[in-house]
Amino acid sequence: GCCWLNHSGGATTRKFIELVRKHRCIKAWFSGHFHLGQDYQDSITFPSVDPSEGPYPNRGSCVFAQTAVMRGGASRDGRQQSRLIRGDEKGFEICTIDHKRGGIVRLDATISYTDENHEVGVYAHGHDEVDEMGGDFLRVYSPTEGDECFVDYDNDGYLDATESTCVDGQTIAWWKLSCGRVLGVYDGRLIEYDPSTLAPLGLVVGQDELAGRRIVVVPSGEESCQVEGADGGREVADCETEAEEQAVCLIDDATGSVTVVQPNEDGSYWRKIVRNKIVRMKEKRRVEAAARLVDEIFPAHETDQPTVFSSWGPYTQISGTASKTRVEGVTSARAPSTTKLGEVKSR
């Protein structure tokens, strides 16, 4: 569902869009338990777009629809809604059941089959409910191949993502890294997008950290990585792919400082701010098991709650060798990691 896909990534989740593209008999995909209502324009996405809006998005023959929640306590915008599907041999209708208004049914979209592999979708209402929200409603921008917000590299391989200006709430830009990842700026945030669908994957840098800075992408690979040996192979073992290594830099002209946005170990950039619920559940069970062990070993401990800490390993610095395994911030104070240019040793 929606939650698992949002909290995961890589080949594990990519296979779902690949299935949709391969099997055009999949006509609708509903992402359940979404915490926003179904009145928003982006809550239903048709498989094709008007040619004036961009190229064919390659979403198979499938309509994607977000499905909200029925309980008020789980809703972030006060809406309590679910989906109703009505269909026949000619197509199907996607409707909204409004549980907050006595279960009234509203037609949202009609999808008509033109043949076994294609269909035409038509929205059924003008989002009047959302228009009443005024500035609180925003149709989210998503990159499209060939649009005017795409930024390319110069002849030296440098990319000035914000055209030498600082990021603000009006900045819209996106670009492709040499590794195939896609990054962009929207609503004052740095976001990673799926390379295949250009749908947002998640937040990389928030407004608080990005405000007043500009973004520059520079080559960062070693020169020897670009030199082939006598046998045609790479001379440096660290060169794992043909893609040129790059550094995404946030430049603060006011302080003269530069922040390097480091990718995750899997190569992605978006931060897993809300961690996978399955993983969190297993971690919680391990802590509970440790707490029960504390009760058995120390039955006369003074406090009501046993002292149990969690550790995720020592790799918190750029150094590749682990020498300490303390729980930073719990059993010791965490020191900031700073690297000065003069401290970097040449190889």
Image (cartoon, helix red, strand yellow):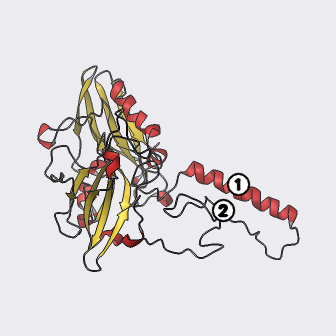
Residue lying furthest front: 230
Residue at x 44% of width, y 38% of height:
11
x and y percent of residue 149 in the render?
17, 53
Q: Residue 286 carries which label?
A: 1
Residue denoted by label 2: 310
Residue 86 in view here: no
Residue at x 53% of width, y 51% of height:
276
Residue lying furthest bottom: 255
Q: Name the residue type under label 2.
A: Ser
Q: Name the residue type under label 1.
A: Arg
Q: Which of marks 2 and 1 is nearer the N terminus?
A: 1
- Element at label 2: loop
Q: Quadrant of the C terminus?
A: bottom left
Of residues 93 and 121, the one drawn nearer to the viewer in this rendering: 121
187 w.r.t. 109: above or below: below
Neighbor class of circle 2 (other Cα within 10 Å; few <14, some 14-19, many 20+) is few
Is there CB contact under 8 Å for labels 2 and 1? yes
Residue at x 45% of width, y 51% of height:
69
x and y percent of residue 267 in the render?
41, 49
> How far separated are the C-alphas under marks 2 and 1?
9 Å
In this image, 200 relative to 338: left or right?
Answer: left
Q: Residue 83's quadrant in the figure?
A: top left
x and y percent of residue 114 in the render?
22, 23
- Element at label 1: helix
Q: Residue 313's quadrant in the figure?
A: bottom right
